[in-house]
Image: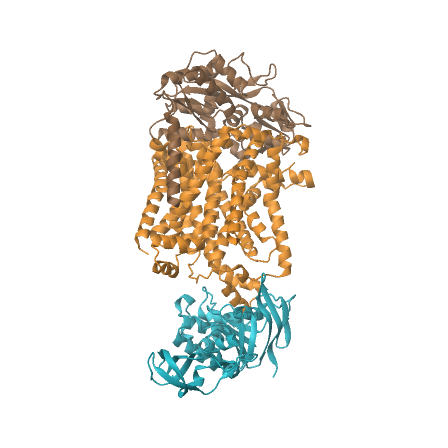
Chain colours: A brown, B cyan, C orange
């Protein structure tokens, strides 16, 4: 009996899965991304609404899973995605270096500082400082070491943290550690830890910090000088896509005014200037790590970092 | 002679069912008391209560004139001077026969090598000395039961409790075991309570027999008493084959060996059983069915009319 | 028992183990060898790797050394039929497995770290929770219910009240009985539990990741995660796979002989023990044991669960727990059709996985004395320890061409990962089938499958229920593999969890885990009550 039930369940599940794929008329385009769900869903819906008959098949997962998926695809018949939207330039640079994506970018007004011939930056993460109410929020990044018990995210698991490491250099972190700072896992863990009161201040991404503040957690957000570290998320077209028309349409859409407005209104920072955007205080400077140099220095940087915070 | 065991108004219950009801019993030094009863009558329960594994609902247990259990308190089994021999042997799968028998000695603080040599002696006396290095899985039923007996002897207890020890042994092995038991008993002189459902075993082994039915003791007496003078039909059936014949105004109880062939009464042979040394007949008589035992080979066949007479009979009290 | 049934069971076992274990393992070995052998020496001699190996094995040893005695002690303590509230305790000790590991670390931190519940209520915190000690205790608290289940199963089918009574009648005090008779006879069950916990802990990831990193306590699994997180370049990716393969190799070297050496197979007569057969213990133990159990449960379950539930009902992190901050918004955010579909799919998958694994685990346990059975047992321990992401990668590379984006590939991942979890409780119950009972059934006219179903299965019921329950819950809570293997139309709970976690919304994640727990406990509790009523009525 157990046999039959199990087989029946298997068959049903298999049937359900394939049925959904069978209802679309045109070939769907496959999107791999690590952008958060609240941003990607409206973008997909608006795109599908404006392009009748084209469906977007989404695979969304944190960067680690994204990398694993891409690498597995490569070793089992080729990349299945038509479009990849990453969350940091380093990841995308590696994909380009492997010849998986690139070669085409859409016409767009997005600043050239976040574009290359192979990809276009369409969303930005900013590393800012989050402080528990009652503690002095740092005005500059060097103030962070005087902010009490501080938490920083782990550059081994979060590209945003790696970007910050690339920009500040290991000495900055050595200084923090000397004053008693702790390293947690992701920027979200920093925000949660500071909101809970385990830590007094920390470095995290702006979306996370503002979300916590909005929901009522006792935190303040500051954009310390010389500037918030900007990590932009590029989108690129797969080199082996069999669906280049709709895929190019999607990339163009995300880079267009409409697409960027959606990105901005759903809680992420757009790269196109003059579009609706989440909280960004007036004339706050931002700084950009040198991503190309960072790609080469990654191993050395992480090794130096491990000497500070490692086991 | 002093009493080794005294039970006063012992009652015991499992959840809501009464397993033992006001049991009164004594066992004197050197005496073997057979506890005879059908399955479910409470024999194991009574032994476990005496050993200290079950709490009492009411009553008292005295061992060697010392009170060891009441409804509220009970001395733990390891402190009582009892030894148990189990129906399913109760050997430890991970210990050899030698270590098993040495176990009670070790608990008394005897040094390991001394305990082992004493254990070897006990095994030798029981004729299983050469099996000392084997584990239970490598022993037959009879051998396991003798190891169990050796272990009980190693305890040097004042009272031995036997819980249907021959239930799982075949006939020849059983006879060997009982012979060993009798030999040891003469040696040790300890008291024993021997639970069984087999009447022949009980009558042969015991100094006194106690009949237990549904948790109550219905009769206690010498083997001859309970065989020849049972207090009621239940007691009669427990202690051997029995027939009930209608008399003038009372029913009479007849054991097969109290009737003989030849005489002034008549019956028809309903069944014939040749037992080797004797023959059992089942006769249909006007007063009821009768079981009759006669020495020798079968002399009559089924359906034959025979004459028979009574040497002896017993009228149940209270009839 | 070289019957037709045994032969087909073996064939089934070998086919399945090849499909779900051997294929992904070979794929991973191949990838690691072809692309990574040049750097193999570098990887092995890296001091980070060596300290991670030391940390992983140290953690496994510590967790096993802590969880096994506690689990066995609980199983023995709950044998006493006169223990007050015994049925409650038997259920309560299983509470830790209801908390999914994606919220486990957070719950403990919220309960015990600086500015946590204990700090708010009593003014003291337990700072070591954020370090190796904390990781050990938390992982051990999740392992104790497993040890308890396997030991309890072993007690119910292997233990013999007569042997214990014989020991007491031979003059042994209760403690001596424990050490000379009970524990040696429980040996096989305890050994199989210990090996399981050791191997499970080697592959554990969520807690060391969240709690270990602040303390710089890296394990092999967190190293692999780090490699994958930055694994957009082939070198990091292959290094992750190489590390995983090395972990598996080391595990085999340690575990395969352990399974052989520990737990001598002892044959026992199989008279099932009744509750009334067990000693009742003294008055003192009946008062002390419930108190100790209560304290233990409050520490390991009560406070962390309270922290979790309070996070689910609170508007934001960090504000006081007073009623004006209570809200249902987190639950409303979670109760969407999409969540419902994902949850439904996860439940279906977990039920399917549990049921199939019961068959596979049962066959493995039944054939565990044969050479092929032992080989299967070792093979499935490999996928148990293999970190989920890497196992998923192996399945993707091996089957991605045909099975990508199907539910089947997720199911295969569950089967591969949880197989060992299914067969160990069952082998703890019985190491071979009792021939007498089977022969009696067949002499009464039953064919072998019916005989197995009517004679063997009822005896094994506690083990089977334990195995199914463990697999069901672990499959339901599984996040790493499902989030990598899913596709459009096959979203599972994992995706919903990661979506909310990615936005840092711990309240929503907590609400999700509360929802999942309710969805499991309510029908489970109803079934259990019905089962008890049918047995008594």
Can I make out residue B142 in this image?
yes
* Coordinates of residue C332 in the picture (x, y in percent): 57, 29
Say whether residue C316 is left or right of residue A43: right
* Coordinates of residue C184 in the picture (x, y in percent): 48, 60
Q: Is residue A36 above or below residue B187?
A: above
Q: Is residue C7 above or below residue A8?
A: below
Q: Residue at x 62, y 42 (%)?
A: C303
Count of marks overlaid on the render: 0
Q: Is residue C524 above or below residue B270?
A: above
Compare residues C264 and C468 and report the one nearer the observer: C468
Say whether residue B152 is left or right of residue C118: left
Compare residues C296 and B55 and report the one nearer the observer: B55
Compare residues B38 and C214 and report the one nearer the observer: B38
Say whether residue C260 is left or right of residue C76: left
Q: Residue at x 49, y 38 (%)?
A: C477
* Coordinates of residue C349 in the picture (x, y in percent): 43, 38
Compare residues A289 and A236 and report the one nearer the observer: A236
* Coordinates of residue C2 in the picture (x, y in percent): 31, 55
Location of residue A208 (image quadrant):
top right
Q: Is residue C235 above or below residue B227?
A: above
């Amino acid at each position: 009996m157990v046999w039959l039930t199990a087989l029946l369940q298997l068959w049903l599940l298999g049937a359900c899965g394939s049925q959904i794929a069978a209802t679309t008329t045109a070939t769907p385009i496959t999107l791999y991304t690590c952008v958060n769900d609240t941003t990607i869903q409206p973008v997909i819906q608006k795109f599908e609404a404006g392009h009748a008959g084209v469906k977007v098949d989404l695979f969304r997962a944190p960067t680690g899973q994204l990398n694993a998926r891409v690498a597995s695809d490569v070793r089992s018949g080729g990349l299945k995605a038509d479009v990849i939207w990453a969350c940091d330039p380093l990841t995308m640079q590696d994909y380009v270096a492997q010849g998986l994506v690139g070669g085409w970018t859409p016409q767009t007004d997005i600043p050239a500082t976040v574009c290359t011939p192979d990809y276009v930056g369409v969303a930005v993460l900013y590393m800012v400082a989050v402080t528990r109410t009652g503690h002095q929020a740092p005005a500059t990044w060097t103030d962070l070491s005087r902010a009490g018990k501080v938490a920083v995210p782990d550059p081994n698991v979060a590209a945003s943290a790696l970007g910050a490491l690339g920009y500040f250099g290991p000495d900055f972190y050595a200084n923090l550690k000397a004053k008693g700072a702790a390293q947690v896992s992701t920027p979200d863990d920093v925000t949660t830890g500071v909101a809970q009161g385990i830590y007094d201040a920390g470095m995290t991404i702006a979306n996370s910090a503002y979300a916590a503040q909005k929901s009522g957690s006792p935190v303040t957000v500051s954009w310390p000088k010389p500037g918030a570290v900007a990590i932009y998320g590029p989108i690129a077209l797969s080199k082996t896509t069999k669906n280049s028309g709709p895929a190019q349409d999607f990339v163009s859409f995300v880079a267009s005014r409409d697409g960027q407005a959606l990105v901005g209104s759903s809680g992420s920072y757009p790269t196109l200037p003059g579009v609706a955007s989440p909280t960004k205080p007036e004339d706050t400077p931002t700084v950009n790590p040198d991503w190309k140099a960072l790609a080469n220095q990654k191993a050395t940087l992480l090794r130096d970092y491990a000497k500070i915070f490692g086991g | 002679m002093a009493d080794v065991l005294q039970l006063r108004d012992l009652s015991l219950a499992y959840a809501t069912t009464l397993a033992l009801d006001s049991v009164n019993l004594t066992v004197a030094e050197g005496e073997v008391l057979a506890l005879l009863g059908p399955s479910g009558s409470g024999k194991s329960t009574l032994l476990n209560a005496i050993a200290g594994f079950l709490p009492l609902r009411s009553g008292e247990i005295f061992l060697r004139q010392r009170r060891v259990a009441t409804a509220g308190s009970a001395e733990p089994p390891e402190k009582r001077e009892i030894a148990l021999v189990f129906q399913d042997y109760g050997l430890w799968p991970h210990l050899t026969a030698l270590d098993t028998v040495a176990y009670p000695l070790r608990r008394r603080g005897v040094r390991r090598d001394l305990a082992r040599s004493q254990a070897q002696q006990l095994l030798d006396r029981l004729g299983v000395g050469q099996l000392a290095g084997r584990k239970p899985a490598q022993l037959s039923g009879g051998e396991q039961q003798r190891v169990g007996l050796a272990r009980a002897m190693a305890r040097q207890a004042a009272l031995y409790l036997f819980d249907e020890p021959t239930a799982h042994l075949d006939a020849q092995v059983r006879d060997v075991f009982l012979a060993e038991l009798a030999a040891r008993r003469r040696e040790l002189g300890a008291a024993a309570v021997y639970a069984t459902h087999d009447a022949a075993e009980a009558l042969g082994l015991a100094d006194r027999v106690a009949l237990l039915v549904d948790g109550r003791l219905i009769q206690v007496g010498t083997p001859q008493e309970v065989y020849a003078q049972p207090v009621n039909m239940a007691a009669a059936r427990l202690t051997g084959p029995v027939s009930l014949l209608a008399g003038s105004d009372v029913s009479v109880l007849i054991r097969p060996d109290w009737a003989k062939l030849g005489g002034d009464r008549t019956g028809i042979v309903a069944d014939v059983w040749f037992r080797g040394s004797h023959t059992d007949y089942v006769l249909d008589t006007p007063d009821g069915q009768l079981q009759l035992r006669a020495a020798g080979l079968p002399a009559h066949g089924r359906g034959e009319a025979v004459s028979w007479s009574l040497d002896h009979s017993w009228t149940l009290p209270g009839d | 028992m070289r019957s037709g049934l045994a032969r087909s069971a073996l064939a089934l076992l070998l086919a399945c183990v090849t499909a779900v274990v051997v294929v992904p393992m070979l794929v991973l070995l191949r990838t690691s060898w072809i692309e990574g052998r040049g750097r193999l020496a570098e990887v092995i001699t890296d001091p980070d790797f060596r300290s991670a190996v030391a940390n992983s094995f140290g953690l496994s040893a510590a967790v096993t050394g802590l969880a096994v005695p506690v689990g066995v002690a609980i199983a023995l303590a709950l044998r006493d039929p006169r223990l007050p509230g015994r049925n409650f305790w038997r259920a309560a000790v299983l509470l830790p497995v209801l908390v999914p590991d994606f919220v486990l670390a957070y719950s403990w931190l919220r309960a015990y770290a600086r500015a946590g519940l204990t700090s708010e209520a009593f003014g003291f915190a337990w700072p070591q929770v954020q370090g190796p000690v904390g990781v050990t205790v938390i992982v051990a608290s999740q392992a104790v219910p497993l040890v308890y289940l396997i030991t309890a199963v072993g007690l119910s089918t292997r233990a013999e009240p007569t042997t214990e009574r014989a020991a007491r009648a031979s003059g042994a005090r209760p403690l001596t009985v424990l050490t000379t008779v009970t524990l040696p006879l429980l040996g096989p069950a305890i050994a199989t539990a210990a090996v399981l916990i050791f191997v499970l802990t080697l592959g554990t990831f969520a807690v060391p990741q969240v709690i270990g990193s602040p303390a710089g306590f890296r394990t092999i699994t967190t190293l692999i995660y780090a490699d994958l997180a930055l694994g957009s370049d082939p070198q990091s990716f292959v290094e992750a796979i190489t590390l995983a393969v090395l972990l598996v190799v080391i595990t085999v070297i340690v575990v395969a002989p352990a399974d052989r050496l520990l737990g001598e197979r002892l044959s026992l007569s199989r008279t099932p023990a009744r509750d009334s057969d067990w000693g009742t213990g003294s008055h003192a133990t009946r008062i002390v044991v419930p108190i100790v159990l209560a304290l233990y449960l409050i520490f390991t379950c009560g406070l962390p669960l309270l922290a979790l539930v309070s996070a689910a009902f609170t508007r934001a992190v960090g504000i006081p727990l007073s009623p004006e901050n209570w809200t249902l918004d987190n639950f409303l955010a979670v109760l969407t059709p999409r969540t419902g579909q994902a949850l439904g799919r996860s439940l279906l998958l977990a039920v399917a996985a549990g049921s199939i694994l019961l068959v596979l685990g049962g066959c493995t346990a039944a054939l565990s004395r044969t050479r092929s059975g032992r080989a299967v047992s070792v093979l499935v321990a490999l996928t148990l320890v293999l970190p989920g992401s890497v196992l998923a990668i192996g399945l993707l590379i091996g089957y991605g061409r045909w099975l990508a984006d199907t539910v089947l590939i997720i199911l295969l991942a569950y089967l591969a990962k949880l197989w060992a979890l299914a067969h160990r409780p069952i082998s703890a119950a019985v190491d071979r089938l009792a021939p007498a009972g089977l022969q009696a059934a067949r002499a009464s006219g039953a064919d072998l499958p019916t005989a197995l179903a009517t004679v063997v299965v009822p005896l094994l019921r506690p083990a089977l229920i334990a195995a199914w329950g463990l697999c069901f819950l672990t499959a339901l809570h599984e996040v790493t593999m499902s989030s990598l293997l899913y596709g459009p139309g096959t979203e599972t709970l994992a995706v919903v969890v990661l979506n909310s976690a990615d936005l840092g919304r711990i309240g929503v994640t907590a609400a999700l885990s509360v929802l999942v727990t309710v969805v499991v406990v309510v029908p489970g509790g109803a079934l259990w009550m019905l089962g008890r009523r049918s047995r008594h009525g």
